[in-house]
Image: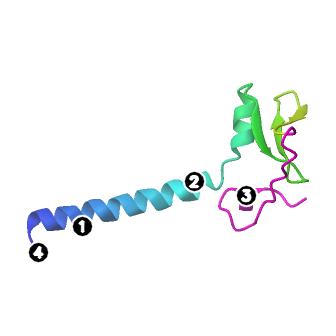
Amino acid sequence: MTTSDRRSDEVAELNAELDASLSATACTIRFGEVLAARGEATAALNEHGRLTRYYPDGTTSPLGQKSGAVVVPTRHHPLVSRLPEP
């Protein structure tokens, strides 16, 4: 194995370790709470599967009501799986 091959393997391994570390950390952060603390409005699915805007003051407003579409979350999606159970 040449030095450049070894270096390439080391970079790939480092990238994989970094990706795993970032993914693990991201799973523990409640981004909605972080953004609300900064005064930012967020959007997420409510307990009925409807896209909803959440304001820092605790109020909410529905999004996308004109289409009448309802998003049905699946627990297999990496983001939706972190939603609290209804």
- Give the Cα distance between marks 1 and 2: 24 Å
Please tell me whether mark 1 sits on a helix, a strand or a loop: helix
> Identity of the amino acid at label 4?
Met
* Residue beneath the point at 83% across and 57% down: 84
Report crowding for label 1: few under 14, some 14 to 19, many 20 or more residues within 10 A (C-alpha).
few
Which stretch appears magenta? 65-86
Label 4 residue SS: loop
Residue sitting at x 90%, y 53% = 47
- Which residue lies under the disc numbered 2? 25
Left or right of 2 on screen, residue 45? right
76 inside magenta stretch: yes
In the picture of the structure, the residue carrying the numbered disc 4 is 1
User: Percent from the top left, x then y, of residue 18?
Assistant: 42, 56
Q: Which mark is residue 80?
A: 3
Percent x, y of residue 75 = 75, 66
Mark 2–mark 4 Cα distance, whole angstroms, equals 34 Å
> What numbered label is drawn on residue 9?
1
Q: Earlier in the sequence, mark 4 or mark 1?
A: 4
- Amino acid type, mark 2: Thr
Q: Which sits earlier in the primary sequence, circle 3 or circle 1?
A: 1
Q: Are marks 1 and 2 in contact (CB under 8 Å)?
A: no
